[in-house]
Image (cartoon, rainbow, N blue to C red):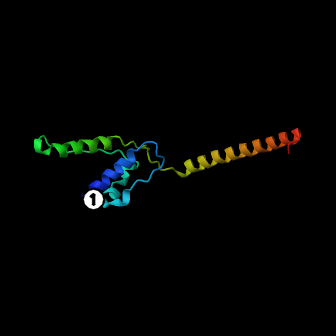
Amino acid sequence: NKSLSALGNVITALTKKGKAKAHIPYRDSKLTYLLRDALGGNCITSLILAASPAAYNSLETLSTLRFGHRAKQIQSKVSQNKNLSAEDFRNLWMLAKEKAERQSREIAELRIALERAGLN
């Protein structure tokens, strides 16, 4: 099935280590496109695997367990979505403005120090 193969490719891409911002092929199938937020987004996701104890399904069960193990290796950073009020935005703006003013004063002091040292 193309969708399950694409899902396996997405999970493999999400679990690769050492690749900063590697391409995740979410658009390869409709299934992976629909699951993109659950797999690599800001969500906590549960995965339920169906395995059979029958001997004739042993290869399928092993494949399912390997898939589950790969999916378990996905690590996403979940953060709470916040809705800021106008007062919160005003406070953030004031903090940014104060920081910019401090940096401007520091730059001016450094320029004066350079002029005194004759390095300007």
Residues 85 and 73: in front is: 73
Q: Position of residue 24 (x, y in %)?
A: 41, 53
Q: Residues within 10 Å of mark 1 (few under 14, many from 20)?
A: few
Tally the numbered discs: 1
Say left or right for 118 vs 86.
right
Q: Residue at x 39, y 42 (%)?
A: 75
Quadrant of image for the N terminus: bottom left
Say left or right for 29 vs 24.
left
Residue 54 can be seen in this image: no
Q: Position of residue 105 (x, y in %)?
A: 76, 43
* Residue linked to disc 1: 2
Residues 80 and 46: in front is: 46
Residues 18 and 109: in front is: 18
The kind of residue on which mark 1 rests is Lys
Q: Residue at x 87, y 42 (%)?
A: 115
Quadrant of image for the C terminus: top right
Say left or right for 81 vs 92.
left
Q: Position of residue 52 (x, y in %)?
A: 14, 43
Residue 65 can be seen in this image: yes
Say left or right for 67 vs 99.
left
Instruction: Classify mark 1: helix, strand or loop.
Output: helix
Q: Position of residue 31 (x, y in %)?
A: 30, 58
Q: Residue at x 89, y 41 (%)?
A: 118
